[in-house]
Image (spheres, rainbow, N blue to C red):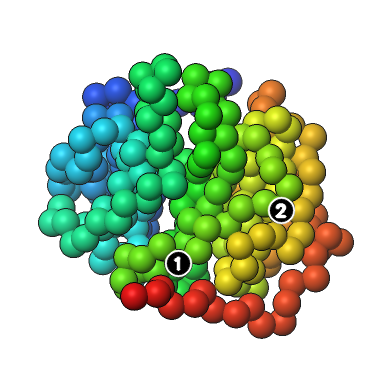
Amino acid sequence: ESAEPIPLRQVLAHQGWIRSLSVDPTGQKLVSCGNDGRIAIWSIPELKPVHSWQAHENHAYQVGFHPSGKEIVSVDLKGMVRIWDLTGKKIREVEAKALHKYDTGFGADIGGARSMAFSTDGTVLALAGITNVTNAFAGIGNPIILLVDWATGKITKELTSKEKFQGTMWGVAWHPAGFVVGTAGGNGGMLWFWKPDQANEFAAIKLADNSRDISIAPNGKAVAIPSYGGFARIFDITPNLNPPKEVPKVPPAKK
């Protein structure tokens, strides 16, 4: 046996970085996106190409299947959210302006969704990123999560922290109880918890290091967070939270 992991299969999927991967609900398809702006669907486990198309003019940062498995959502550097059917036909698009800034001083774009997650019932999409950017080179701005109504494509809520925090929201997830969990890195690390109908968090936990993503245990009692320095940490969140018995649903978008 080899001391180092050996790939069972590998393919050249994109020109440049692969930014995001997601498996469909059946476990039979994989979707990928990358800096070339393309989306590609692959069969599992063969990794044979099923379909691919040019989805964005800019770097595609996130891609994923809707819980129904019938649609795909992708988000690019400039915060353009696009919904596709499995053939690559665009169904609609949403411009998440809060997730993008062009810094004229440095002549650079900064933004895009750095993480995204669907609510359990698939009715709401949460997008995590950075907003209010004042320096694109240093990544100076504030973490933010946008909630998007899947049926209408309207942005229904912007989730931010009560105390200003410098950095990027690198991870977002939905807790089984129905609230939103986000983690950020920048000037330190933070973990926040929001009811989806309220702009500010109902609980917050300061972390030892900058965080880069988040995963919630199926029972909702713990979160795993990869951190700066190569560490992955697991936190028991039950002592810090008293989740409401019933979390209000996201209010409908204003017409």
Looking at the figure, which quarter contains the N terminus? top right
Would residue 10 be seen by someone viewing this image from the given angle? no
Residue that label 1 marks = 156
Which residue is situated farthest in the top direction here? 106
Residue 246, picture quadrant? bottom right
The three-letter code of the residue at mark 1 reads Thr
Label 2 element class: loop
Residue that label 2 marks = 162
Which residue is situated farthest in the right direction here? 239
**Residue depicted at 71% across the width and 53% down the height:** 162
Residue 18: % across, % down: 35, 31
Residue 89 shown left or right of residue 208 in the figure: left
Counting residues from the start of the chain, the first of labels 1 and 2 encountered is 1
Q: Residues within 10 Å of mark 1 (few under 14, many from 20)?
A: some
Residue 47: % across, % down: 27, 41
**Residue depicted at 48% across the width and 56% down the height:** 146
Would residue 42 be seen by someone viewing this image from the given angle? yes
* Residue 106 against residue 32 in the figure, above or below: above
Which residue is situated farthest in the bottom direction here? 246
